[in-house]
């Protein structure tokens, strides 16, 4: 017979598609992710300058690292808001928490370069995954 489901319904369910994640929540998370990426690039740049200037930029590197922690906390809050009330994906909240933990490991392993440098690579990998997801069309899909 005739299918009475709306044209934009989910196939096989007969229900209307879910509304996307609220734009304000998603945009706020995107801003936090970009801010995290920028602070990580600045921090890494200051680390390189510190090595090449015999530690003269070391204090700036430490201060930028503290800013990374602050932005990571904001990012966790935004990701949880997208996940819970926004009904978005939950994994960005977990990755954001992972970014915070790895950032804290960076803080405590600053004298041990054999741990500090790989942790920095992990940070860049995680933030790259977050950037790719946040600006993809799938970021606005509800779960």
Image: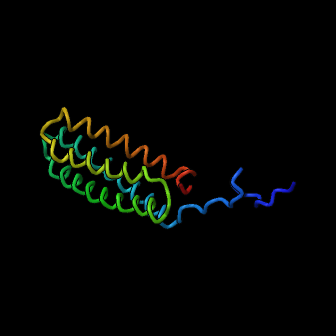
Residue in view at x 40 percent, y 54 percent: 33
Q: Is residue 37 something that shows in the picture?
A: no
Is residue 39 found left or right of 85 in the rendered image?
left
Return the residue nearer the eye: 79 or 110: 79
Q: Quadrant of residue 7?
A: bottom right
Return the residue nearer the eye: 124 or 16: 16
Instruction: Tell me if residue 91 comes above or below residue 15 in the rendering.
Output: above
Residue in view at x 44 percent, y 62 percent: 84
Q: Quadrant of residue 72?
A: bottom left
Return the residue nearer the eye: 3 or 93: 3
| The N terminus lies in quadrant | bottom right
Is residue 83 found left or right of 75 in the rendered image?
right
Of all residues shown, which one is farthest toward the front?
1
Of all residues shown, which one is farthest toward the top?
114
State the image coordinates of residue 8 (x, y, percent, origin top left): 73, 58
Counting every numbered tag in the picture gives 0
Return the residue nearer the eye: 28 or 6: 6
Instruction: Tell me if residue 55 comes above or below residue 78 in the rendering.
Output: above
Q: Quadrant of residue 78?
A: bottom left
State the image coordinates of residue 138 (x, y, percent, origin top left): 56, 50
State the image coordinates of residue 73 (x, y, percent, origin top left): 30, 59
């Amino acid at each position: 017979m005739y299918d009475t489901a709306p044209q934009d319904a989910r196939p096989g369910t007969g229900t209307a598609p879910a509304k996307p994640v609220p734009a304000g929540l998603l945009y706020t998370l995107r801003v936090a992710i970009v801010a995290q990426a920028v602070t990580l690039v600045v921090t890494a740049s200051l680390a390189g300058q510190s090595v090449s200037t015999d530690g003269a930029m070391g204090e700036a590197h430490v201060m930028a690292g503290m800013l990374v922690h602050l932005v990571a906390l904001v990012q966790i809050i935004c990701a949880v808001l997208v996940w819970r009330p926004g009904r978005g994906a939950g994994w960005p909240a977990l990755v954001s928490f992972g970014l915070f933990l790895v950032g804290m490991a960076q803080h405590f392993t600053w004298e041990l370069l054999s741990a500090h440098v790989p942790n920095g690579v992990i940070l860049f990998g995680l933030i790259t995954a977050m950037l790719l997801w946040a600006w993809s069309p799938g970021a606005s899909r509800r779960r």
